[in-house]
Every structure is written in structure tokens, then in C-alpha cells.
């Protein structure tokens, strides 16, 4: 789901750099940060994590999945 917000530019730059260094998409790093924060607050996300990973996989490998389905 897309949303709009404001954040500290230094933090955003660091998150973008982490994504680049790890060869990941920014939204994946941001999702991980959100999940870690919620876990720290005692809010378990076991089912949501699976759904998030599946959704990210579909976005990242959509063309590959289409080819494999042929």
C-alpha cells in the first residue's frame, strides 16, 4: 500500500544506502524497519510477514513467474 509521509532526510538516505548495499528495494528495507519497530513494541507480525514477503516476491519476480507458468 502506498502512503505519503515526511521523514528525516538523513534517515531516509541511510535506508536508501542500506538498500543499495544489500541489492534490495527501498520498500523492502522500510518494511523491515517497520516490522522491527512493531516487534520491539510487542506486536507480533508472523502472518503479516509471510504476506509481505509473498507480495514483495510477486513484485520483484513477476516476469519470471509469468515465464515459469507458461
Image (cartoon, helix red, strand yellow):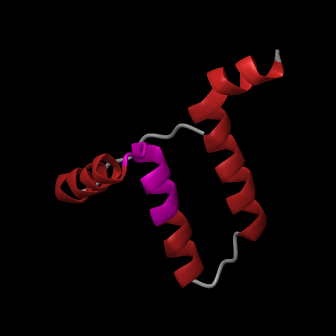
**Residue 21 position (above or below residue 44):** above
Farthest right residue in view? 70
User: For residue 7, what is the image quadrant?
Assistant: bottom left
What's the residue at 39%, 45% (across, down)?
A: 26
User: For residue 68, what is the image quadrant?
Assistant: top right
Left or right of residue 17: residue 46: right
* Quadrant where the C terminus is found in the figure: top right
Left or right of residue 15: residue 5: right
What's the residue at 57%, 73% (across, down)?
A: 38
Farthest left residue in view? 10
**Residue 21 position (above or below residue 38):** above
Magenta segment's dominant SS is: helix
Q: x, y percentage for residue 60?
A: 57, 34
Q: Nearer the viewer, residue 68 or 26?
A: 68
What's the residue at 51%, 73% (across, down)?
A: 36
* Quadrant where the N terminus is found in the figure: top right
Asked whether residue 49 is drawn in magenta, I would say no
Q: x, y percentage for residue 29?
A: 43, 55
**Residue 39 position (above or below residue 54):** below
Q: Nearer the viewer, residue 12 or 21?
A: 21
Q: How many marks?
A: 0
Asked whether residue 27 is drawn in magenta, I would say yes
Left or right of residue 5: residue 59: right
Q: x, y percentage for residue 55?
A: 68, 42
- Magenta stretch in the rendered image: 23-33
Q: Nearer the viewer, residue 1 or 29?
A: 29
Q: Nearer the viewer, residue 66 or 2?
A: 66
What's the residue at 63%, 85% (across, down)?
A: 42
User: For residue 48, what is the image quadrant?
Assistant: bottom right
Amino acid at each position: 500500500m502506498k502512503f505519503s509521509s515526511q521523514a528525516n532526510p538523513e534517515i531516509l538516505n541511510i535506508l536508501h544506502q542500506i538498500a543499495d548495499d544489500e541489492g534490495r528495494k527501498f520498500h523492502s528495507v522500510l518494511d523491515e524497519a517497520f516490522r522491527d519497530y512493531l516487534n520491539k513494541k510487542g506486536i507480533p507480525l508472523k502472518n503479516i510477514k509471510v504476506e509481505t514477503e509473498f507480495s514483495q516476491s510477486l513484485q520483484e519476480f513477476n516476469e519470471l513467474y509469468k515465464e515459469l507458468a507458461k
